[in-house]
Amino acid sequence: MRACRSARVHPDVATFHPGYTYDAPHESIAPMKFTQFAPAVAVLALVAGSAHADVTLVRLNTFPTARSLPFFVGVEKGIFKKHGIKLEFEFTESSSAQREGLASGKFDVVHSAVDNALAMIEVAKVDVVIVSGGDGGTNEFIVGKNINSFADIRGKALVTDAPNTAYALMAKKILLKNGLKEGVDYRINAVGAGPFRLKAMLEGGDNAAAIMNLPFSAQTLEAGLKSLGRTFDMLGPYQAGGAFVLRSWAKAHPETLERYLAGYIESLRWVVDKSHREEAIALLMDKRKLSRSLAERSYDLMIEPGFGFNPDAKLSVEGFNNVLTLRQEVEGGPKPDPAKYLDLSYYDRALKRVSQ
C-alpha cells in the first residue's frame, strides 16, 4: 500500500482541499490538507439551513475526478443537509482499495465504475448491489507523444487502475479490436487511480496508452499527448459511474440510502443546469485546483449526455448491458442476468422525494 493516497474530505469544513491536485500537468501529486474548524462552528455549519432536525452520516468513497463536482456542490449548497444527510467523502487510490473498503464496512456508499460492483459479486463473492447510474465516464483512449496509431502500442505498456475491471477491460477490448493481445503484444502497468495514470503517462517511457477521463484526459492533451478517440465511439454506450452499496446495508438503512440518492440527484441537477456554468467552473478551479481552461473543458464535456453525466443519475439500460457484455467477452463466464446486480427501487423512491 502506498502512503498518503487516501484523502478524506471532512464533512464539517467549509473549504475543501481534496486529495490529489495539479497546478500544472507536469507537477507531482500532492496529498490533501484540510483544516478543522472549532466544534461549535462545525456544528453550526453542518446544521444551518437543514430541513431535518437530525442528520445521518453517510460515508462515501469515490475517485478524485472532475465528476466529483456534484458532491462538492451538494455540500457547499446544503443540498445533502436539506435531505438529512451529513456527507463525509473520501477519495480512493485505486478501485482495489475501494472495493476492499466497501466490503469491510469502511464506507457506506461507493460512487465508481459499476463494473467494480460486478467484480465484487462475481470474483470476491461480496453481496453488493447497484442502486443508481451516474455518468458515461468521459473516457478517451490517450496515448504518448510518439504514438500515432494503435499499432505503435505494440511492445509497450497499457497503463491501468486494476487490470481486471472497468476501464482496463475497455482498453483491452479496444486493443484486441485493433489486433493487439494482452501479454503478447503489450503488457499491463497497473498503477491505480487517475492521478497515478496521469503521472505514468507524463513520465512516458514504455507507458504508451491509458483510458483517461476528466480532468486527467484534458491535462494529458495540454501536455502534448494525444487522444485516439472516445471510448463511446469505439465501443458504444457504457454505464461507467454509478452508486453501489452492500445489499445488507441498503436493507438496514433504506431511508438513509433514499435520502442520499435524492441529495445526489438534486446536486446533479444543479451541476447540469447551464445557468450555473460559471459557478460550477469556479468550484472546479477551487476544489480540484484546476486551471480555468481545464475547468471549462471538464464542465462542458461532463454535461454532454451519453459522454458525461446521466440525466438525474438514471442508469442507462443499454450502457449497463454493454458493461455486462464487455466483462463476459474479456473475462469469460456465463452470460450475466442484469437483475442480479441491480436494485433501483431506492433510486425510484429518491426521485419521488426530489419531485415533491
Image (spheres, rainbow, N blue to C red):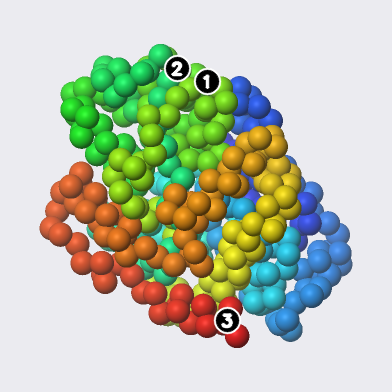
Q: Is residue 104 left or right of residue 47?
A: left
Note whether residue 120 is visible: no
Looking at the image, which residue is at 53% across and 41% down?
A: 214
CA neighbours of label 1 inside 10 A, class few (<14), some (14 to 19), many (20+) = few
Give percent across and percent down for residue 301: 53, 46
SS of the residue under disc 2: loop
Whether 115 is drawn above or below 93: the answer is below
Q: Nearer the viewer, residue 52 or 31?
A: 52
CA neighbours of label 2 inside 10 A, class few (<14), some (14 to 19), many (20+) = some
Whether 234 is drawn above or below 188: the answer is below
Whether 122 is drawn above or below 50: the answer is above
- Which image quadrant is residue 42 in? bottom right
SS of the residue under disc 1: loop
Type of residue at label 2?
Lys
Q: How many marks?
A: 3
Q: Quadrant of the C terminus?
A: bottom right
Type of residue at label 3?
Ser
Type of residue at label 1?
Gly
Note whether residue 130 is visible: yes
**Label 1: which residue?**
224
- Could you tell me how far apart the alpha carbons at marks 3 and 1 are, in whole angstroms? 45 Å
Answer yes or no: do the residues labelled 1 and 2 have beta carbons within 8 Å?
A: yes
**Label 2: which residue?**
145
> Counting residues from the N terminus, which is met first, the one under dot 3 or under dot 1?
1
Looking at the image, which residue is at 26% across and 60% down?
A: 321
Answer yes or no: do the residues labelled 3 and 1 have beta carbons within 8 Å?
A: no
Q: Nearer the viewer, residue 3 or 317?
A: 317
**Label 3: which residue?**
355
Give percent across and percent down for residue 86: 66, 69
Whether 8 is drawn above or below 174: the answer is below
> Counting residues from the N terminus, which is met first, the one under dot 2 or under dot 3?
2
Give percent across and percent down for residue 354: 58, 78
